[in-house]
Image (cartoon, grey):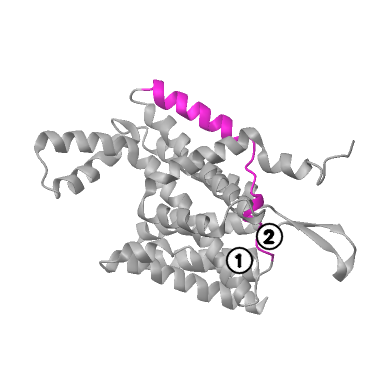
Amino acid sequence: MNRALVYGIVCGGLSAALMLLLARTPFGIVFAYVTPLPVFFAGLTHGVLAAALAALVGTALAVAVDGWMGVIYLALFAAAPVILVRQALLARPVAGDGPEAAWEWYPAGPLVGWLAGIALAAFAVAVLAASGTEGGLPGLMAPVIDKVVGAMQVGQQNQAELVALASRWMAALVAASWMVMMAVNGALAQFLARRLGLARRPAPAFADLELPGWLAPAMAVGLVVGWLGNSTGYLGWTVALVCGIAFFLQGMALLHWLMRKGKLPAPVLGLVYVLLLVFGGLAPLIAMLGLFEEWARFRRRQAAAPDNAPED
């Protein structure tokens, strides 16, 4: 318990420091991206209470500097890691007893489902909070976007068009980038915990990731609403993009599974990662691969198939 308290306090302080560097340095976005990492690390090494303590300490320090900064820190960087750590550390015995028991840990697919669910819940709260503003959530974001676009010194007509377009898509892009940030930090925290011999659970088998069944229907509804909607179309596109990030992860899991089975050379998978870094347009294709896997259940069919065909 004492170690959990120490890790919670230290990790919370480090996370808050990264948050404060976000606002005070030209390269703050780099620090913002790893702000959740200490909270994940505290939880994956010393339990949910350590993660919750890190979140509380980080929030208190951020509030001490600026009240709104504390709210932003808690909402964007601290609350979700605590929830995800709590789920990740769920386990049940499947064989044996006592110290020799084998445990089944909460799998990666439902964790991604929780991540998408948190993103959608936060989006719903933002939509409701902005419902009293003219134009809703896009209308609330438009003045901020207008200042950013104005600094780019584009023509007045082009500026109006860019602001309108960015306002409709900004919520979706923020939700998608937040999901990627959380997934990367959670995976990195687990990697560091294992390297240091402090991990409370084994790393989830990424190649076996299977998403919860609700994501595909939610994405379909989002696409329909986005396509048919006018002023409310951004609601559907945001839902679709959040679900699309989840299917992108499932598509990557399928590629890892193919490599594990010897059906895809490791250099090819490495090339995919390089192309994703330099050419993000590959991501929708991988998300489509994840959608295909949702329908075809290729990995599950292969696992159920006999190793050898019966002889005549």
Q: Tag 2, which secondary structure?
A: loop
Residue 164 is one of the magenta-drawn residues:
no
Q: Tag 1, which secondary structure?
A: helix
Q: Quadrant of residue 190?
A: bottom right
Q: Is residue 275 left or right of residue 217?
A: left
Q: Quadrant of residue 17?
A: bottom left
Percent across and percent down for residue 230 are 34, 23
Label 2 Cα neighbours within 10 Å, binned few <14 / some 14-19 / many ≥20: some
Residue situated furthest top in the rendering = 228
Kind of residue sitting beneath label 1? Gly
Q: Is residue 74 visible?
A: no
Give the residue at x 78% y 41%.
305
Of the residues under marks 2 and 1, which one precedes in the sequence?
Answer: 1
All told, the count of numbered labels is 2
Kind of residue sitting beneath label 2? Leu
User: Does 198 appear above or below 89?
Assistant: below
Label 1 Cα neighbours within 10 Å, binned few <14 / some 14-19 / many ≥20: many
Q: Which residues are magenta?
A: 201-229
Give the residue at x 52% y 32%.
219
Instruction: Report which residue position mark 1 lands on.
Output: 43
Question: 305 or 8, which is in the foreground?
Answer: 305
Give the residue at x 88% y 39%.
311
Question: CB atoms at circles 2 and 1 under 8 Å apart?
Answer: yes
Q: Is residue 257 visible?
A: yes
Instruction: Report which residue position mark 2 lands on.
Output: 89
Percent across and percent down for residue 21 are 33, 69
Question: 132 or 296, which is in the foreground?
Answer: 296
